Amino acid sequence: MPDAFYSDFDSAAWGENGPQPPADDPHRTPYQVDRDRVIFSFAFRRLQSKTQVFQSGEYDFYRTRLTHSLEVARIARSIGEWLRRPEMGGQAIDLDLLEAIGLAHDLGHPPYGHIGERKLNELMADYGGFEGNAQTLRILTQLIYERPDGATGMRPTRAFLDGVLKYKSLRSEETKRKGQLPANHFIYDDQANIRDFVFGGRTAPEDVVLNKFKSVECQIMDWADDTAYSLHDIVDGAKAGFLTLDSIQAWAATLPEDLHWMREHAAYERLLDSIKQNKLEPRFANKVGNFIHACKLAPVENFLSGLTQRHAYTVVIDPEVERERDIYKQLALDVIFRSTRIQQIEFKGGVILDKLFNALADHYLDGRMTGRALKVLPEPVHSWTVGAADEVSRARYLCDFIASLTDPQAARLYKRLFDPDFGSITDLS
């Protein structure tokens, strides 16, 4: 088993003024420090009350962003253990690093799931946009620790940042490529220096598709994420009554021609049989192992492969397991996410975030102020926003605040600002 997969290049820590030495801890590796700093953060704990598929707090057994992140971290670590086997590639990918990346990968998601991300991107269109992965990067490098005089990041290692950085294309680059503002899959333009740090100062060749250029740990996290939500959304959807024999068969009957293969795949029949026998959850729990064992490593060459082994390997997934994943993702999208019940809840979440952002903008953005500005943000965010250097920075602080809210916090703030019968001067903030 190789024992020198990582070097000082990988463990170097992010710093505003250049790479820093990793945390000096005699009892923990730099990647264990990364993991522990995530676990003990407010940003991580807030995930317990943020929507994964179904609204947070509606029932106890549905997954939240927190339980999803725990599952992704565990699956990613298991994939790393599997890939250490000689026949799978035999590389000593750091398991604590994989766990840290899995725990952190959704830190930047706002309240109300994907509608929250889309709505904030729309509201921030003139101020740099919003993207969940970019916000995760911002939290780790700038916001995770709050102090009265400002916020600061956690000095994450290069390997950890690279593993979390699922998308590497700047918003301006995606805008130029698409000819319009992107809806997702970008990082903020002011994060170009972080990408430079991740790349060790090297420039990616023009033929490299940045949003597909991922370290081996990022690829593992990505497949662990796919494993968790493609399998577990099905289980949660069945428990919630969205997925029944009738609804699944009706879905299969209306698949477009290019997706007819889905209803002919063995996984489709096994799904129906599992529901008939009331064995969906235990059988899908076993499928997690199948998805883990579908991975193997293959060597690859690129502009960073000579600098770090993290970019000298790619994760290869068994095509049949990928097709099974595709069936579950398509089923969840069509029957759960596009259902009237879920879309009504998404609409409501979008309305709440829209009104919150515009209320704050009316009091903090120069071009929006109406009359005397009120102190409607709590400290220390109010002081940070007022003291920001320009309009774009103030808008970003407003966005940071709203994105950090849990689903219940957003609902309470909405009621406090807009419901005449809700709220008191004695309320705890």
Image (cartoon, helix red, strand yellow):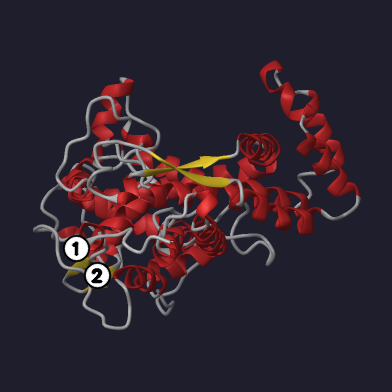
For the N terminus, which image quadrant?
Answer: bottom left
Q: Residue furthest right?
A: 277
Disc 2 marks which residue?
380
Q: What percent of the width, then of the height, locates residue 211?
A: 36, 36
Do callouts 1 and 2 mark residues in contact (Cβ within 8 Å)? yes
Q: Determine which quarter of the picture holds residue 372.
A: bottom left
Please name the amino acid that badge 2 sits on: Pro
Please name the amino acid that badge 1 sits on: Trp
Q: Any mark on residue 384, and which?
A: 1
Along the horizontal axis of the image, is 46 left or right of 13? Answer: right
Q: What percent of the width, then of the height, locates residue 102?
A: 46, 59
Name the residue rendered at 71%, 48% in the picture.
234
Q: Nearer the viewer, residue 258 or 364?
A: 258
Residue 421 in sight here? no
Name the residue rendered at 30%, 42% in the picture.
187
Q: Determine which quarter of the picture holds residue 424.
A: bottom left
The Cα atoms of the two marked residues, 1 and 2, are separated by: 6 Å
Q: Residue furthest bottom?
A: 27
